[in-house]
Image: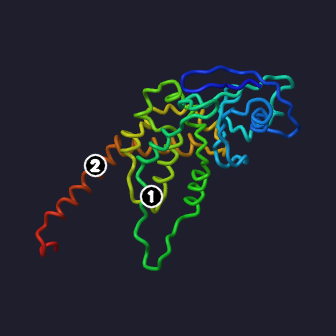
Amino acid sequence: MRVWRGDATGGELVDYTVPVEEGEVVLDALHRIQATQSGDLAVRWNCKAGKCGSCSTEINGKPRLACMTRLSTFEQGETITVTPLRTFPVIRDLVTDVSYNYRVAETIPAFAPQPRPADGAYRMQQVDVERGQEFRKCIECFLCQTVCHVIRDHEENKPAFSGPRFFLRYAELEMHPLDTNDRRQLAREQAGIGLCNITKCCTEVCPEGIHITDNAIIPMKERVVDRSFDPVTWLGRKIFRRDQLEEAQVPQGRAE
């Protein structure tokens, strides 16, 4: 194995020869390096079951979960190179600072449901339930974020571009039939969804198999375009807004 060792000031790839057993994954090999050769190797992990997203790394140049990447997927004798997520600052060895993602998450308006009906039961179509279930499969491994070339290759884009994980979040909220917030303008102006050129690289690396591009980003782009540029939608907003203003200006007692 070849593992990147270093910190924010710099580092290098270090070679290790690691004994492994059938059925093991890359994270097992990293743990064996910790136990037998380099006890100070830093690697983030938690569940070892592909559900926490903690062990995100780049393995032979591809963003993957170390706990879900079987050693048997590589050729006999092939060197396995493990490096930290390229898009985020290195803290130490394979551990990166992904706090950028949490700062972005804080800017998205939360779910705001409609008032509960008199009988206390919300109702949704089954198709809406199933669509939302796909989006909520996200484990926040941020592999889609690190592979997105808009921020991977252009650090200066981060303040204006939220990335695929959060376009997924926008879509999850906007497509919920009970939600009352309208985040389409934010998706365009704050999240920078227009900068995404739908190469589908985020979908390709998603360990949960979420169709991020087809089911979230493209529909959100369509909603944003409808709101901002569709003349019929624009006229409807103008008329609706004018009606609201006229109602607000009618003196009390003369609403009839």
Mark 1 closeness class: few <14, some 14–19, many ≥20 residues within 10 Å: some
Would you identify the image quadrant in which residue 83 lies?
top right
Mark 2 closeness class: few <14, some 14–19, many ≥20 residues within 10 Å: few
Q: Residue at x 44, y 38 (%)?
A: 193
Q: Residue furthest right?
A: 22
Q: According to the image, label 2 marks what residue? A: 235
Position of the C terminus, as image quadrant, is bottom left
Looking at marks 2 and 1 on the same chain, the residue that comes earlier in the sequence is marked by 1
Q: According to the image, label 1 marks what residue? A: 111
Q: Residue at x 40, y 34 (%)?
A: 160
**Residue 45 location in percent, x, y?**
67, 43
165 in relation to 240, above or below: above
Here the colouring is rainbow
Q: Residue at x 34, y 48 (%)?
A: 233
Question: Element under label 2?
Answer: helix
Is 73 positioned to the left or the right of 206 in the image?
right
